[in-house]
Image: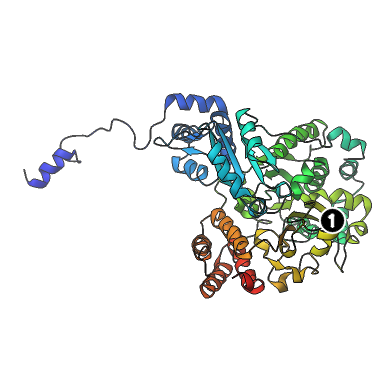
Amino acid sequence: MGVVSNIAQKRGHPGSGRKKTRGQPKGRQVNPEALTEIQSLLGAPTRRDLLIEYLHQIQDKFGYLSSDHLTALAAHMKLALTEVYEVATFYAHFDVVRDDEQIPPAVTIRVCDSISCQLAGADQLIDELKSNAGSDVRVVRAPCMGRCDMAPVAEVGHHHMGNVGVPALLDAAEQRQIHPVIPAYIDLDGYRKEGGYQLLQKCLDGDYSPEDIIEKLNESSLQGLGGAGFPTGRKWSIVRGFEGPRLMAVNGDEGEPGTFKDRVYMESDPHRFIEGMLIAAWVVGVETCFIYMRDEYPAVIKLLKTELDKVRAAGLADHVELEVRRGAGAYICGEESSMIESIEGKRGLPRNRPPYVAEVGIFGRPTLVNNLETLYWVRDIVEKGPAWFANGGTNDRKGWRSYSVSGRVNNPGMKLAPAGTTVNDLIENYCGGMIEGHSFKGYLPGGASGGILPASLGDVPLDFGTLQEHGCFIGSAAVVIFSDHDNMKDVALNLMRFFEDESCGQCTPCRVGTEKAVKLMVKPQWDTGLLNELSTVMTDASICGLGQAAGNPINCVLKYFKEDL
């Protein structure tokens, strides 16, 4: 027998005369106890698109996601383990603990370090917490929590606390005050006493036609208030024109630093939004509506589920199925195609377009996507008349805007004002002026991605289409005010670190560009030529708006705040 034959016989190769048997299948083996726990928790059958929901349930139950539970989940759902791991590790709010890693402490305190909270002392708060917290408390940084008017903000478990200091946070952690606090809000009975759902009923009874509602929206000039500003009535007509079955997604993932208007509306008058959503579903002929709400709003999610159960019981949603989907800490899912990927139970990676989601959206079906606040205004526009809304503007603009104002002002908060209101007007007439000892220096007109403008441009109307000539945009109207105490290089660095952390990593210009930008921006002296070039590449070559807008803070500092360089 030759040398090759001898080797083959030893290795059990075919033809060697021996058959090698494997003691167990390849890969990580399922722990029977973990599988029993997963089966008991989730039941059967399971749905592939609910993978993120199942991960939430597991983490809520056990406090983290262990390798054994993830392996058992994959077996229970008949998925490849990689499919489960890639989703679990994509979203920031999932604590994946591998075999050689330490289980997280019983309580986690997350401190927001986005721009409004940084201005309010978040860095010092984090340092003091880490120095004083016990071994059973974990302190970590977190991006914007949608409470910029209460800065600094922190989260103990799922309990959010604003204008907070170290003693209160440590006391909440010690007392295990980790559950969300439900605010006082107008429930179903209170809303119906004020005439709520009468418009929906008229639609269902045939007093209005779908065309009637669309015409009123067109006359009102209502635009998408999530940031894109696309005419709402036209969008409804487009989706309605595609052959069904049609679906709908409500974008409640307002993760733009500085934005909190949707939370304010949902924590006070949720049924005004719900009625608008149900009317939209009726007009477009929607089979199922998915309400995608960011995980940073646990109180909203809880009250929304409670009130939707009441709506179903009252027979107001018989024409559409309603599902609430809980995000998991990914800013990118505010982009509509990323949100749709997340609704399908996958990583929130933006899709290449065309096709657009209006035609090929959730599960490949025509999909209507609307921001939460956009739907909030539907009832008022129809009942009060399109002119009521359209005439609300100023400086030759149309409509009303919900400006989320934070930063160096006396009275931050959500300010309902005419579209086209200027930042000077917001500061003086809505926010009680600048904090004592601070002079107005600059502002974000549209959150982290909207750019930075100087005080000399404080009389520019804030609305869609008014800021582009200055290299900025309004987006979701997140207005953050800066003073002479702030260095714009530091502001831009904070914003770029946010983009670096939140980049989904799918495209190289954004993934590498934001990381490279941060490395250049931390240096005492900026390489302005290289930063300019980097910003241009990100803008021109990134797949979605995150990378395309990431260079705006750089561009604006170089253009408007040269004294800070």
| Count of numbered circles in the view | 1
Q: In the rendered image, which quarter is residue 298 located in?
A: top right
Can residue 354 be seen in this snapshot? no
Q: In the rendered image, which quarter is residue 463 located in?
A: bottom right
Which residue bears the numbered disc 1?
A: 430
Task: Identify the residue shown where x is 77% and y is 48%.
Answer: 285
Image coordinates of residue 98 in percent, x first then y, are: 43, 37
Q: Is residue 259 left or right of residue 215?
A: left
Using the image, determine if residue 253 lies above or below residue 545.
above
Image coordinates of residue 140 in percent, x first then y, are: 55, 43
Task: Identify the residue shown where x is 34% and y is 37%.
Answer: 26
Q: Label 1: how many residues lie within 10 Å, few (<14), some (14-19) or many (20+)? A: many
Instruction: Please name the colour scheme applied to the rendered image.
Output: rainbow
Residue lying furthest left: 1
Q: Which residue is more in the foreground, 259 or 231?
A: 259
Q: In the rendered image, which quarter is residue 133 located in?
A: top right
